[in-house]
Image (tube, rainbow, N blue to C red):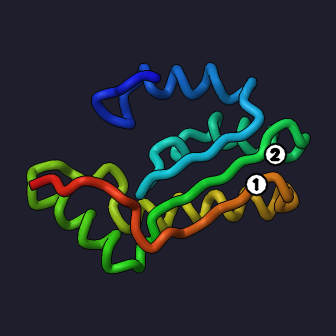
Amino acid sequence: MKIYPRSQHPAFFAEVEKLLPQATEITLIATGLNLIWEKRIVDVLVERAKTGKAKITICMGNPFSPHVLDGLIEEETTGEHAPVGREGIERNVKALLQQLDLEGNHAGFSLYACLNIIRPSLH
């Protein structure tokens, strides 16, 4: 197990890119999920699901949930700028859904909008 100072850390992305080609079950859980900003990572996820080499599950914060909105507001008020914010979450989900539609919506790929992502308070 490794710990990274933030999800945008280059070492975290490098570790993910190293593990994705070999993992058979991949579960990603986050509010905005910075990983799906990276086209090359999404392409690998979709391809692994498409070929049946991996089962992919993505759980993201529902940008319309008051709990997720509270968390995004809390990040802003503590001086921490939310990496994606509500609009970014919506944009990322729409882009991912469009790509999945183009690729044929593979059974090995599941996407969930969660009412709340459990996280400690920043205060």
Residue drawn at x 30%, y 72% is: 69
In the displayed orientation, state which residue is furthest to the right: 51
Residue 67, how many percent across, how many down? Answer: 32, 74
Residue drawn at x 42%, y 22% is: 2
Q: Please tell me how crowded label 2 is: few (under 14), some (14-19), or many (20+) other residues with Cα within 10 Å.
A: many
Out of 21 and 116, give the one closest to the viewer.
116
Q: Mark 1: which secondary structure?
A: strand
Mark 2 to mark 1: distance in Å? 6 Å
Looking at the image, do the residues carrying marks 2 and 1 touch, with CB atoms under 8 Å apart?
yes
Q: Is residue 100 left or right of residue 29?
A: right
Q: Mark 2: which secondary structure?
A: helix
The quadrant holding residue 102 is bottom right
The residue wearing badge 2 is 49
Out of 32 and 116, give the one closest to the viewer.
116
Residue drawn at x 31%, y 34% is: 6
On residue 109, the disc is: 1
Q: Amino acid at mark 2?
A: Ala
Out of 21 and 92, give the one closest to the viewer.
21
